Image (cartoon, rainbow, N blue to C red):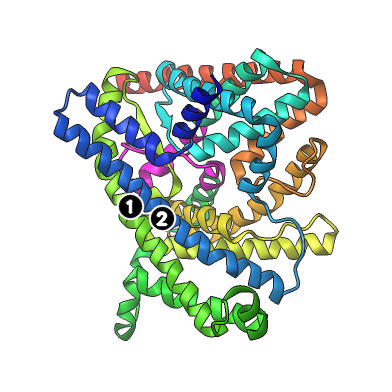
Amino acid sequence: MKDVLDVLIDIASTPAILVAFIAVVGLLLQKKGIADIIRGGIKTFVGFLIVTAGANFVVSSLEPFGIMFQKAFHVTGVVPNNEAIVAVALEKFGTYTALIMLAGMLFNILFARITRYKYIYLTGHATLYMACMIAVILSVSGLDGFLLVLFGGISLGIANTVFPAILQPFTVQVTKNDSVALAHTGNFGYAFSAIIGKYFGNKEKSTEDINFPKGLAFLRDSTVSITLTMGVVYMIVAIFTGNAYVTEKLSGGTNYIVYALQQAGSFAAGVFIILAGVRLILAEIVPAFKGISEKLVPNAKPALDCPIVFPYAPNAVLIGFFSSFVGGILSLIVMAVTGLPIIIPGVVPHFFCGATAGVYGNATGGVRGAVLGSFLQGILISFMPIFLMPVMGDLGFAGSTFSDTDYGVVGLLLGNMANGGGKMLVMIGILVVLGLVLVASKVTTVRNAKKSTEA
C-alpha cells in the first residue's frame, strides 16, 4: 500500500508527469487518434521539462547572488524557504501530507464541478507544500487519522479552487482570454498587485511599450535587456563582496567579475528557456483540456504555474523582480530598526513572486502598476512570514517559515484557529469557509443570470 501511495504522490507532485497525464486524459475523452494522443502527451511533458530546466537555470544563478548579498552587506536572519521547511516536516508528517494532497486534489475537482469556480489546480509541488503545512498545523490542533485527512483535504481543495478564482479576472487581462488560470502559492499577492495597479497605475503606459532611444533599440529584446541589467547588478554585488570570497567560496577560482557576468547570462538564459517551454505547454494543454471540460467538469480551466504569464510581459518580469527585491530590502531595514525578527530577502521567491506580481500590476496599471504592485508585494512576502513564524515556532519549526502569500493566508487562518480553540474550532472554521465559498458561488451565479436576462 505504501509503495502504491508513494508512486501516486510522485506522479501528483511532478508537474511534467501530472500535466502530461491530464493532457492524455483530455485527448482520450475527445476520442482523438493515437498519434494525436501520443504527440499531445509528449509535447506537454517535454514543455514542462523545458520550463523546469529554465527555472533551475534561474535558481542556480540566483543562489550565489543571495550568498554574495548577505556577505557584502553583513546581513543575518531567516531566509524563508519552502523546500527546507517541507523537507524537515515530511520526516514526521509525510504520510498525512501524502493523503491530504490526494484528498485535496479530489476535493478540488469536486468543488470545480459543483461551483462556478471551474479551476483545476495542476501545480503539483505547490499542492504538496501546502498539504504539508496543513498537515502540520492540523496535527498539532489535535486532529488525527481520518478527520485530519478529511478536513486537511477540504482545506486544500478550497485553497486550490478559490485562489485561482480570486486572481482570474486579472489573469484574463494578462492573457486576453479565459482559457487558462494561474496556480501558484502567491496568487493572493498577485491579486493584491493587480488591485494596486488598477487604482494607482495607468494601464495605457505598458512596460512593453517603453520607448528606447534609437541607439538603444536593441534593449527591446528582453534577452539582451535582462542580461545587461542583471550583469550590472551582479557586478555591483560582486565588487562589494570582494574577489577573494567569490573566487574561494563560489566561483571555483574564476575571477569575480567574469563569474558575475556568467551568472547574469545564465539568469537570462533561464528566462529564455522558461518562455519557450511555456509557449509549448499552452499550445498543447489548452486544446487537450477541452475533453476534461466537456466530460468531467463542464467549462473547466487548467490552472498552471506562474511562469505561464511571463511571455505576456517580459519587461514587467524584470521590473517586478527588482521592485519586489527592493521592497524586501526596505522591509529588512525596518525590521532591524524596530527589533522585529529579520527576514532576509530570498532572491528566488522575490524573482518568481515579484516577476509575476509585476506582470499583473502592469496588466491593470502599466509601468507604475508593475513597479508599485510588485514593490508592495515584496513588502507583503517579507512581513507575512513574521506573522506565520509564531505558528510554525509553536510546532517546532522556529527559525524557518514559508515564503509566499498563500501560505500566509491559509497558515495564519488555520494556525490561529488551532491556537484559539483547538481541533473543534478548526473543523467548524473549515466548514464555515466551505459554506461561504458555496454561497458566494451561488449568489454570483444568480446575479450573473439576472444581468444576462435584463440585458
Q: Which residues are magenta?
A: 161-190
Magenta-drawn stretch, dominant element (helix, strand or loop): helix
Can you tell which mark lies on residue 277? 1
Can you tell which mark lies on residue 53? 2
Disc with the residue nearer the chain's start (2 vs 1): 2
The answer to which quarter of the image holds residue 41 is top left
Q: Horizontal placement of 167 versus 237: left or right?
A: left
Q: Which residue type carries mark 2?
A: Ala
The span from disc 2 to disc 1 (Cα, nearest Å) is 9 Å
Q: Which residue type carries mark 1?
A: Gly
Q: Is residue 145 above or below residue 39?
A: above
Q: Horizontal placement of 8 versus 379: left or right?
A: left
Q: Are marks 2 and 1 in contact (CB under 8 Å)?
A: yes
The quadrant the C terminus occupies is: top left
Which one is nearer the viewer's eye here, 206 or 251? 251
Q: Position of residue 312 (x, y in %)?
A: 34, 54
Q: Residue furthest right?
A: 339
Q: Horizontal placement of 86 versus 164: left or right?
A: right
The answer to which quarter of the image holds residue 168 is top left
Q: Position of residue 131 (x, y in %)?
A: 60, 31
Q: Is residue 360 above or below residue 397?
A: below
Q: Position of residue 305 (x, y in %)?
A: 44, 44
Residue beneath the point at 71% across and 32% down: 92
